[in-house]
Image (spheres, rainbow, N blue to C red):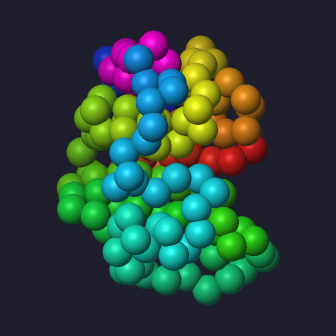
């Protein structure tokens, strides 16, 4: 995993702090899937997968595209356990986009920055974490269940 540049980290930190301060208990926007959703609920939010994966070792990985965003969702036991978001053009996600993804996955909890170079935030109930990094040459924001 590639580390982000200082200005990218500052941008990520602003988004996290904004989310923690203002959006912790606001109901998520209904147009975004969230951790714990079924494949059917994810399809209602993002449409049918552009690449429906086959189950392997208890996980199924589907790839969706919504507008200019690629969304990779992993399912285990019929529920979403990880979601990764990146722009189709490979450019960084905006603060507003990251805030929306955190908001959709807040589970009524605050997100707490963990500090350090890893760009990690932990949901206060310790049931999910989010990370912003460069994976496979793409700026990627991902959220996973713990």
Does residue 57 lie above or below 8 as drawn? below
Residue 2 visible within the image = no
Residue at image coords 35%, 74%: 47
Residue lying farthest bottom? Answer: 54
Q: Does the magenta run of residues contain 95? A: no
Residue 67 visible within the image = yes
Q: Locate residue 135, reporting x and y percent.
A: 47, 49
Residue at image coords 49%, 83%: 52
Q: Locate residue 130, reporting x and y percent.
A: 56, 37
Residue at image coords 38%, 23%: 15
Q: Locate residue 138, reporting x and y percent.
A: 36, 50
Residue sitting nearer the eye, 22 or 1: 22
Q: What is the chief secondary structure element of the magenta stretch?
A: helix
**What's drawn in magenta, residue-wise?**
9-21
Q: Judge from the rendering whether residue 56 lies leftward or rightward of residue 133; answer left or right.
A: right
Q: Judge from the rendering whether residue 75 lies leftward or rightward of residue 43; answer left or right.
A: right
Image quadrant for the N terminus?
top right
Which image quarter: residue 8? top left
Residue sitting nearer the eye, 61 or 1: 61
């Amino acid at each position: 995993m590639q580390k982000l540049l200082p200005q990218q980290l500052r941008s990520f930190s602003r988004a996290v702090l904004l989310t923690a301060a203002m959006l912790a208990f606001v109901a998520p926007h209904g147009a975004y899937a969230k951790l714990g959703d079924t494949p059917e609920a994810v399809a209602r939010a993002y449409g049918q997968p552009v690449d429906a994966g086959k189950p392997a070792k208890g996980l199924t990985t589907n790839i969706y595209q919504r507008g200019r965003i690629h969304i990779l969702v992993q399912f285990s036991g019929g529920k979403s356990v990880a979601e990764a978001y990146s722009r189709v053009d490979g450019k960084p996600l905006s603060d507003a986009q990251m805030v929306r993804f955190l908001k959709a996955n807040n589970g009524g909890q605050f997100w707490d920055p963990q500090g350090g170079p890893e760009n990690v935030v932990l949901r206060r109930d310790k049931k999910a974490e989010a990370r912003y990094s460069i994976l496979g040459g793409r700026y990627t924001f991902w959220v996973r269940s713990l």
